[in-house]
Image: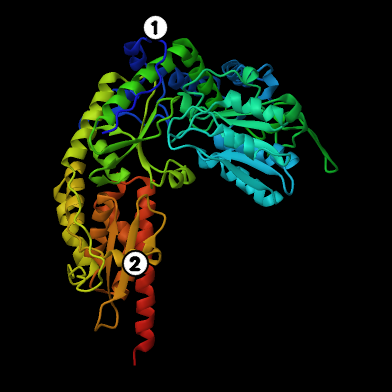
Amino acid sequence: MNVITLEPKPRRPALNLDRVRADFPILHQNVRGKPLVYLDNAASSQKPKAVIEAIKHYYEHDHSNVHRGVHALSERATEMFEEARVQAQRFLGAPCLREVIFTRGTTDGINLIAQTFGRLHVHAGDEVIVSALEHHSNIVPWQVLCWEKHANLRVVPINDAGELQLDELEKLINPATKIIALGQVSNALGTINPIKKVIEIARKHGVYVVVDGAQGAPHLPINVAELDCDFYVFSGHKVYGPTGIGAVYGKPEHLELMPPYQTGGDMISYVSFAKTTWNELPYKFEAGTPNIAGAIGLAAALEYVEEIGREAIAEHEHRLLEHATRRVSAIPGVRIIGTAKEKAGVLSFVVDDPPMSALDVGGRLDLEGIAVRTGHHCCQPLMERLAIPGTVRASFAMYNTHDEVDRFADALEAIVSNAKPRMAMSNSKLDTIYPPTAADNPTAAAGELIEFFDAVDDWAEKYEYLIDIGSRIPPMPVALKQECNRVHGCQSTVFLHLRKQPGTPDVIEFLADSDADIVRGELAVLQRLYCGQHAALVSAFDEQAFMTRIGLDKHLTQGRRNGLAEMVKRVKRFAADVALDSASRAP
C-alpha cells in the first residue's frame, strides 16, 4: 500500500453541485442496471442543457450558411458564429479577435500549425522538442514534419512521478531548436506542466512554443497573453462543448506569414485562373463551410463554464482528486501511476496484485455502471517510459461527486479483492495440450454457442461466461510467447501459435493467451469455432455474422472489435495457407 498526498490548495467557495448536476441530462440514467458514474471526462466531457439547447435552437430557427448571404437567416447565423469567436477570444484571453481560428479540434489545430508555421521555420538539421508525456496528436504531426524536412525530433524526459525534467529541457535547447510543443496537462497522468517556466526558457533562446491545451482548457484558467505562448490549441468536446469544434490561438505576426492550411471557399479574397489571393485573418485558415452549430455550441459551453467559475471548478475537481487519490492508494495491490505534485483531475492506476489487465478492470467497473478509460490513452511512448502496457484512468469534471468517487473506489476494491491469480505457465513445449474439436464443423460449433447466448439477456452474465471459458483454455507455454506469435492491433497483449494438426493434411489448431481475461474469453470462442477443423471450412466461416448473431459486437468497443478482427485475420490467413498447400499436394 502506497498512500499518496497531493499538494494542498487554498479552499474557495464550493460550486452549487446540485444545480450543476441538474444541468446535465445524460447523468440521470442507469447503466447496467446501476446509476451512471461518468469518470471518462479526459476523453470527452458531457454537455449541459445550455449547449444542447443552443444547438437545437440554431437548427430550428437560424440555420443558414455564414458570411455570404444577404437574407435574414444568413445574417443571424453569421452573427451567432462570430459571437462564438468573441466568446472563444474571451475564454483564451487573446488580445485580438483575428488571432482565434476555428478548427475541428486540438488534433486539427496542431496539424495546422505544423504544416504551415512548422514548414516555414523548420529546415534540414533543425530540431523540434516535445516531451515524454505527449499525446500522439502532439507527437505525430511534428514527427511527420521532421521526416519531411530532414529535421530531428527531441524528447524532454520525465521523472518517475511523471514530471518534466526542466534541467534536461535546458540542456536539449541549442541553436538548431526551432519549436517546443508541449501539453499543458497530461491526458494520461494529469501532470500540470510548468508552461510559463518553459516559455520563459524558450524566450531566452528565441524558440517558439506551441501549447496543447486539450486537457488544460477544461481544468485551468487560461490567459494566452500572460503566458506569451506563440500558439495555443484546444478542443470543444473536452470543455463541455460539442465534438468536431475547437480553436487555435496564434500570435498575429505568425499567422500573417503562414500559408493557408487548406484551400477553397471563404478563405480567399480573389480568385482567377491566373492567381488567387487569401482572405484576411482569421478566415485565411477557415476554408469551406465551417462547423457553425459546433461553434455556437462551443460558445454556449464556454459561457456556461464562465458562469460556474473556472476557479470554483478547479477547486472542486482538486478536492475530488484528493479524495480519489486517498481512497485508491489505500487499496492493496493497486499502484497509482503519475504522482506529480501538481495535477489536474486525472487518476491513473494499475493493479499489480493479483496482476489484472486495465481492460479487465475497466470492463468490471462498467458492469457496475462506472465509466473509465483503459489502455495507453494515445500515449504509447509514455507507457514505454513507465514500463507498463497501459493504465485504468478515472478523470473528473465539475459534475462529479464525492459519493461517486466512493462508489468507484468501493467497486475497485471489490474487483481487486475478488480477482483470482492465474496459474504459473510452464516454459516447456513438451506435453502441450491443444484444444479438442468442439463440433463437426465451425457452423455446428457456432450453433452451440448461439444456444447459450440466446438464452441469456443480461450482458453481465454473458461477460462472466466469457471469463469462465477463457479461464479454461489450454495453457500456452512461455516458450511460445515470442514476437512471431504476437498479434498486434489489440488493446491487450495477445499471442497465437497456430499449427497443422499432426497426422492430418489440412486440420488446424492453435494455442492462445492474453493478459486480459475478457480477451482470453474471446480466444476461447475462436478455439471452439476453429480448432480441429479443416482449413477450408475455417476460411469459409462467416465469423462477423456469428459475432453479430450472439450480440458480442454490441458490447465490444471499436478498439476491441479491431483486436478481435486481427486475431481472426491471423487464424484465417494461416488456414488459407494450409488449404492452399493441401490442395497443391492432392493427387
Location of residue 347 by image quarter: top left
As rendered, which of 368 and 143 lies closer to the eye? 143
In the rendered view of the protein, which quadrant contains the C terminus? bottom left
Q: Is residue 225 left or right of residue 159?
A: right
**Outermost residue, right direction?**
274
* Label located before the other in sequence (1 or 2): 1
Cβ atoms under marks 1 and 2 closer than 8 Å:
no
Asked whether residue 290 appears in the rendered view, the answer is no
What residue type is disc 2 on? Val
Q: State the image coordinates of residue 121 (x, y, percent, origin top left).
A: 74, 39
Q: Residue at x 37, y 9 (%)?
A: 14
Q: State the image coordinates of residue 220 (x, y, percent, origin top left).
A: 49, 20
- Asked which secondary structure carries label 2, the reply is helix
Q: Where does label 1 land, which residue?
A: 13
**Outermost residue, top direction?**
13
Up the image or down, 263 lies above or below 326; here it is below
What residue type is disc 1 on? Pro
Asked whether residue 253 appears in the rendered view, the answer is yes
For disc 2, the neighbor class at 10 Å (few under 14, some 14 to 19, many from 20) is: many
Up the image or down, 523 lies above or below 465; here it is below
In the rendered view of the protein, which quadrant contains the N terminus? top left
Q: State the image coordinates of residue 84 (x, y, percent, origin top left).
A: 58, 19
Q: Residue at x 65, y 51 (%)?
A: 147
Q: Where does label 2 land, which residue?
A: 571
